[in-house]
Image (tube, helix red, strand yellow):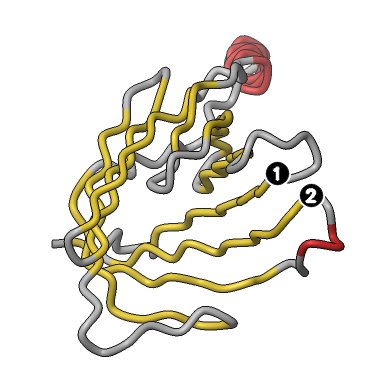
């Protein structure tokens, strides 16, 4: 009985001391916009889609808005990547994967002026069945005299 208890205790201690791996979500796939909430409204004719390719070191997001295609690669290792917006602004971007959530950040300088930066933060979350992607977005200018922050959500369905 004493050997059985000591064996059980060893197994218990080993299992407690092993690092617990957080569940990571793979956002890779194709999605179609099905709705928005908040301050940004879309016309019924608007057709948006996402194509996402995720690797351990980066996530590439290609967004098609009607006929406009924009593609960005966000490093997931804490470093900053290059970001070029569809209107020609240059800036930086980065991503962070924490468990089931993905956070993407970009800062763009559209006109080359130091105080004229536009930022966007996105928080991505997949539904438990991985069929619905909700992206909560905060965007605005670093110089609040140029405009206020905006908040909205985009809801996509996996193709």
> How many neighbours does mark 1 have within 10 angstroms: few (below 14), some (14-19), or many (20 or more)?
many
Mark sitting earlier along the chain (2/1): 1
Name the quadrant of the N terminus: top right
Asked if 128 appears above or below 120 in the picture, the reply is: below
Asked if 106 appears above or below 40 in the picture, the reply is: above
Residue in front for this viewpoint, 23 or 111: 111
Q: Where is residue 99, by image quadrant?
A: top right
Name the quadrant of the C terminus: bottom left
Q: Residue furthest bottom?
A: 44
Residue in view at x 51 percent, y 39 percent: 89
Q: x, y (%) of residue 68?
A: 24, 56
Residue in view at x 64 percent, y 59 percent: 139
Asked if 146 appears above or below 98 in the picture, the reply is: below
Residue denoted by label 2: 142
- Distance from the alpha carbon under mark 2 to that under mark 1: 6 Å
Q: Which mark is residue 98?
A: none
Q: Where is residue 62, by image quadrant?
A: top left
Residue 128 left/right relative to 5: left
Residue 156 left/right relative to 94: left
Residue in view at x 30 percent, y 63 percent: 129
Q: Residue furthest left?
A: 159
| Circle 1: element type | loop
Residue in front for this viewpoint, 109 or 100: 109
Residue denoted by label 1: 117
Q: Where is residue 80, by image quadrant?
A: top right
């Amino acid at each position: 009985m004493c050997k059985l208890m000591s064996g059980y205790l060893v197994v218990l201690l080993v299992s407690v001391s092993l690092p617990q791996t957080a569940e990571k979500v793979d956002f890779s796939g194709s999605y179609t916009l099905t709705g928005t909430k908040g301050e940004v409204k879309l016309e019924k004719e608007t057709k948006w889609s996402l194509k996402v390719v995720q690797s351990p070191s980066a996530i590439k997001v290609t967004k098609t808005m009607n006929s406009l295609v924009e593609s960005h690669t966000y490093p997931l290792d804490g470093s900053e990547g290059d970001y070029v917006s569809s209107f020609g602004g240059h800036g930086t971007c980065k991503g962070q994967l924490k468990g089931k959530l993905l956070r993407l950040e970009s800062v763009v300088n559209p006109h080359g002026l130091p105080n004229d930066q536009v930022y966007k933060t996105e928080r991505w979350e997949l539904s438990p069945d991985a069929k619905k992607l909700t992206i909560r977005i905060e965007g605005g200018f670093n110089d609040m005299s140029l405009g206020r922050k905006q908040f909205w959500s985009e809801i996509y369905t996996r193709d």
